[in-house]
Structure formats: C-alpha cells, structure tokens
Amino acid sequence: MADSWSWFPALAVGVSLLKCLFIGGYRSTDFEVHRNWLAITHSLPVSRWYYENTSEWTLDYPPLFAWFEFALSHAAQHFDSDMLVVEKLNYSSPAAVLFQRLSVIFTDLLFIFAARECCRCVQEQKGSRDVLNQPPFILATLLLWNFGLLIVDHIHFQYNGFLFGFLLLSVAKHLQSRHLQGALLFVVLLNLKHIYLYVAPAYGIYLLRSYCFTQDNKDGSVRWSSFSPLRLFALGGIVVSVCALSFGPFIVTGQLPQVLSRLFPFKRGLCHAYWAPNIWALYNVLDKSLTTLSETLNITALILSSSLKVWFFLKNFFFPGVRLKLLEEAELPRASMTGGLVQEFQHSVLPSVSPFITLVCTLLAILPALASIWWRPRGARGFLRCLLLCALASFIFGWHVHEKAVLIAILPLRSANDTSSNISRCR
C-alpha cells in the first residue's frame, strides 16, 4: 500500500502552494486578534495575560493556546518586532502579514500528517488501479482540500487546521486501538481550544465503555465485572496531568476565576454577530417576525385603547388629579438581536433563552447517541457517528455558536463516510 501513496505528497504540496496565494489577500479582524495575542504573550508577564484589555480582542483561549502564541512570538520577532507591541493596535505591516500567514501554513503540517493517518485507516479497493476511485484518495482530497477550512484559515485567518490536526490524529489513534494516545491528543486539544468540549461527551462515554470495560456479554451488553480501575486511573491521570500543566501556573497565582471568565463569557449573548444557522437563528427570526406583526396589526394600540377607557373611568372617579403619561412608539421594546453586535439581548415576544436552557437542549439532543454507544458500542464506527452527532447537536442548540463551528462536524463527517464501510486495522 505504501508504494501506491505517491499521490499524497502531491495533494499536500498542491494545497500548500494554493494557501500561499492567499497571503496578500483579504483578512478579517481575527488577524488582529492573533497579532494582539502574540504581543500580549511576548511583552507581558504570565500574570497579566488574562487581565490585559488594551485591545478589545482580549485573550480568551485556554492557557495551552496562549503558550502556543508565546512560542510563535519568538519567531515573529525576527520578522517584525513592532508587531509584538501591545499598544500598536491594528498593526499589519507586510512583514507581520507574511509571518502570520506563514505560521498558519506551517502549523497545517500537523493537519496534513493527521489526514494521512486517517487515510491509512481506510482500505483500498482490491483490483482497482484507478487512484481517483480509491477511498484513501477520496478521503485525503476531502480533508486536505476542504474549502471551508481554506476560507476560515487562509482568508479569514485562524489556526483551525492546526487544531483539527489534533482532533483527526486523536480519531486515528482510536481507530488504531491506541486509546491512551487518542485520549492524550484530545485533552491537549481541549486545552488549546475549549470549543471542542462539544464532542467531549462522545470521547468520555466511548472510552469508559470500550476501554475501561474490557469485555461484553454475548448479546453485546456491557459485562460489569470486566471493569478495569487501572485503565480508568490511566485516563484520569492523562486528563489531570495535561490540565495541571496548562492551568497550573494560573491556579497557583489565584487567576483561575479570571481565566474561566474569559473562556466562558456568557454575557456575549445567545447568538454570535454572525449567526450560525441553528435553532436559535430560527427562534430569533420568529421573535422578530412576531414583533413586526404586532406593530403592523397595531395590537399594542388596541390594548392601550381598551386600557385607556378603563383608566379614564377610574381616574375621573377616584383620582381626578392624576395625569396619564403614554410611552412613545420609539420607547416600546423591540427585538435587538439583529444588530450585528456581540451582546446580550432580550427577546421582545418569545421568552428569552438562557445558557442553562441551551445546555439542557444540547444534552437532550446528544443523549440518544451517547446511549447508543454505551449499549451497543459498534467499535470505532459507532464512536465516529456519536462524535459527529454531538458536534451537530452542539452546533444546533449551543450558546453563542459561530457559523464556522460547523467545521467540527464537517471534517469528522468526511472520515465517517469513508471509514463506515472501508475501515481496516491501521498500521
């Protein structure tokens, strides 16, 4: 099989060269976000990283990603040291642009390696010499040339390819039955970007059921007597060790509450400024429509008219000296979630949604998938499907979901499609 993989380097080099074409192109505010984080981690002591607010783009990723930015900043100083000054807001010299663009392309090497590992878990079709019809080639093309990832990372500007490299490599390790390595990679990923908590339930239930319980009954149900405390302690040790290394310095200095407030800013509101096409977008549209409809039909005026008749009767009878002050139309409550801003808002007609409600909805949505891999694990195939469903459920019902978060479901979907019927024991 190794001799037939000469096409993979060509795919990887080709997409890397395409990324280079975007270096001087459009970039979003996330370019300044990451430049500011480079400046914060390079110029300030660790004790100030999560307190610095000179820029509106404050550091709000987990500590391990902050250390990643710290490492990048030492390379950045050889390109343009001015980009590492916190006070230089919206700084974008040609050298700074070149470095940040190249840093994304370079760290994408992890994604390329992870894609190859996933492709090795897919069987080739025997008897077919057409590379274009081989499942490994199809999967590699769908992963490496994913158009959404190209837009988000190399035009919009982020490091999602680097992060998805950890996710895909973790999935590949589980497909290879190297569960401790897969767990380690996923915990590292969580400490790089906590949005992957969306799929953490799939990992937790799968590892508990398929790794900590070593045997099944004949009907496929769990054999409780096969539980291995040693394996559970090994998994727990991995989680505690990585989190201690990531959060330890901030726990020791008493900064953990500040760090958590940055990681989970619930005051940003139910929806992102760029709405994810999920259930809450439909909910907002319905609320806005009902608000507009009530104004169109002048329901408020009808209610006020009836109330005024009663009021004037009571006022003249009991309170002849009291005067009525009416609200102007501009003072009436309106739905404000369509302003394109990241902020809290209240719905005008429908009940407002709290973070707790979104959590409950998400848990209810993923519960069937979790129950399925517990009672009927179905190996790595069941794990992949559960991971996909957890990602989709979190995207549909989550709090403050960005539209690009759908990539967390799209990329595993590529792997799930190609491994569902062609999965093999990876080498």
Image: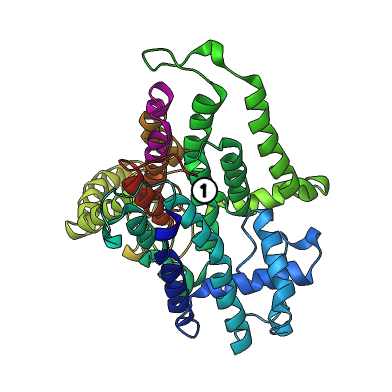
The residue wearing badge 1 is 196
Look at the picture and state if 53 lies above or below 394: below
Taking 277 as reference, is 84 left or right?
Answer: right
- Asked where in the image residue 134 lies, by quadrant, the reply is bottom left
Vertical comparison of 71 with 248: above or below:
below
Count the labels in the image.
1
Q: Which residue lies furthest to the left in this view?
A: 297
Estimate the x, y position of residue 357 in percent, counting from the top left: 43, 38
Based on the picture, tell me whether residue 107 belongs to the magenta stretch. Answer: no
Q: Which of 262 and 343 is in front in this view?
A: 262
Inspect this view and state whether residue 83 appears: yes
Estimate the x, y position of residue 57 in percent, counting from the top left: 60, 68
Q: Is residue 167 placed above or below 334 in the rendered structure?
A: above
Q: Is residue 333 visible?
A: no
Badge 1 amino acid: Tyr
Task: Tell me where the magenta segment starts and ends, as one range.
Answer: 371-386
Neighbourhood count class around disc 1 (C-alpha, 10 Å): few under 14, some 14–19, many 20 upward:
many
Whether residue 379 appears in magenta in the rendering, the answer is yes
x 38%, y 64%: residue? 146
* Residue at the (48%, 75%) spot, across then down: 28
* Nearest to the observer: residue 406 or residue 129: 129
Q: Which residue is drawn at 42% across and 65% down?
A: 6
Q: Residue at x 51, y 55 (%)?
A: 114
Q: Residue 141's x, y, as percent?
A: 36, 62
Residue 415's spot in the image, x, y percent? 38, 49
Magenta stretch: dominant secondary structure = helix
Element carrying mark 1: helix
Q: In the picture, residue 155 is in which quadrant?
A: bottom left
- In the picture provided, is 6 more to the left or to the right than 182? left
**Residue reaching furthest to the bottom:** 94
Color theme of the render: rainbow
